């Protein structure tokens, strides 16, 4: 079974992926470049046991990271405890093999490249991929599968943290759909904050996608991924599809291609 590891700025996601690309299990742990391969091993060994599996059930590992300092210890985990040489997304034999049509293609984040690979494999035509992570990214993938550029905005949780950290009297609140009977005029401090962050974010998304559609000039499907996509989908008809595991599916596809290339 394939163990796909996606190390993001906030969390590292581990997923067991079957041959049909279905996700057998997934776990996440806070990203910490100081966490050793031994620490990862103790943690994931226990989780595998809860699924009725053993370390030996993992026969291949692929790693993607946007945190370079986290890579070495994840490689140690694969080599020492799973007894396999991990495939690193973006490196031979797992190069992207997509046209990154921007002036500095080497700066494209691994997660965004993987999203492009997975989305183009599943959907035809031009695509806009919205990924809700530490940052919220909007990426244009054209009908040929080429990455044409995008937008990086602060993630909603990052925006909320900045608001609370810099305004002494504002309380910490959780992100959820506002309940003001449809009103955008809040009656309490908490509801005003929630309306501002939630509806402000939807307005930003809808506005940016409208501008992107106009610039692209062709029919476009909007694909959303990341944990908050379902929450926003309750209040906007912006998304044509929500694929929570888009990055992990991209890792599975990339691993398949690397095996053929090897």
Image: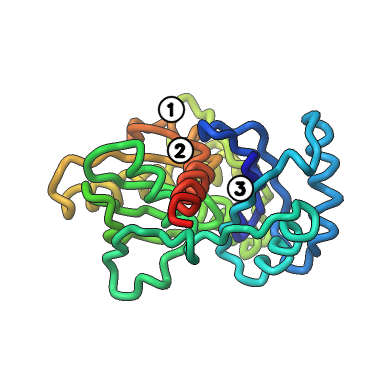
Mark 3 Cα-neighbour bin, 10 Å: few <14, some 14–19, many ≥20: many
Q: Name the image quarter holding residue 234.
A: top left
Left or right, residue 241 beside residue 40: left
Question: Please, is residue 62 above or below residue 192 in the view?
Answer: below
For residue 86, side relative to residue 127 (left or right): right
The label on residue 185 is 2
**Where, quadrant-wise, is the N terminus in this rendering?**
top right
* Residue ID at (60%, 44%): 189
> How has the structure been colored for display?
rainbow
Q: Are marks 1 and 2 in contact (CB under 8 Å)?
A: no
Between discs 3 and 1, the one toward the N terminus: 3
- Residue at the extreme left of the image, as rendered: 217
Q: Residues within 10 Å of mark 1 (few under 14, many from 20)?
A: few
Q: Nearer the viewer, residue 89 or 226?
A: 89
Percent position (x, y) of residue 177? 52, 33
C-beta proximity under 8 Å, tags 3 and 1: no
Residue under the point 43% across and 32% down = 233
Return the residue at label 1.
182
Residue 173 appears in the figure: no
Q: Residue at x 46, y 63 (%)?
A: 109
Viewer-nearest of labels 3 and 1? 3
Give percent across and percent down for residue 136.
Answer: 46, 53
Give residue 232's position: percent from left, percent from top.
46, 36
The local crowd at label 2, few if under 14, some if 14 to 19, many if 20 or more residues have their Cα within 10 Å, is: few
- Residue ID for mark 3: 4
């Amino acid at each position: 079974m394939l163990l796909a590891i996606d190390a993001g700025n906030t969390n590292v996601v581990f997923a067991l992926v079957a041959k049909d690309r279905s996700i057998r299990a997934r776990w996440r742990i806070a990203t910490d470049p100081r966490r050793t391969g031994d620490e990862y091993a103790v943690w994931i060994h226990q989780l595998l046991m809860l699924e009725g599996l053993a370390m030996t059930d993992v026969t291949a590992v692929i790693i993607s990271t946007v945190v370079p300092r986290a890579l070495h210890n994840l490689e140690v985990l694969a080599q020492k405890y799973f007894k396999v040489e991990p495939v690193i997304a973006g490196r031979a034999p797992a190069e992207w093999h997509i046209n990154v049509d921007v002036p500095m293609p080497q700066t494209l984040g691994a997660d965004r490249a993987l999203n492009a690979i997975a989305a183009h494999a599943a959907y035809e035509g031009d695509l806009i991929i919205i990924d809700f992570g530490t940052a919220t990214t909007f990426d244009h993938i054209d009908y040929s599968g080429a990455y044409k550029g995008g937008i990086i905005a602060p993630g909603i949780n990052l925006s909320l943290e900045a608001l609370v950290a810099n305004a002494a009297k504002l309380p910490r609140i959780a992100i959820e759909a506002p309940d003001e009977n449809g009103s955008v005029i809040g009656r309490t401090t908490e509801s005003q904050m929630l309306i501002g962050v939630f509806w402000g974010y939807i307005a930003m998304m809808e506005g940016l996608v409208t501008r992107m559609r106009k610039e692209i000039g062709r029919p476009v499907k909007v694909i959303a991924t990341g944990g908050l996509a379902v929450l926003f989908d309750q209040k906007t008809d912006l998304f044509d599809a929500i694929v929570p595991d888009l990055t992990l599916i991209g890792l599975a596809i990339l691993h398949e291609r690397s095996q053929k290339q090897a």
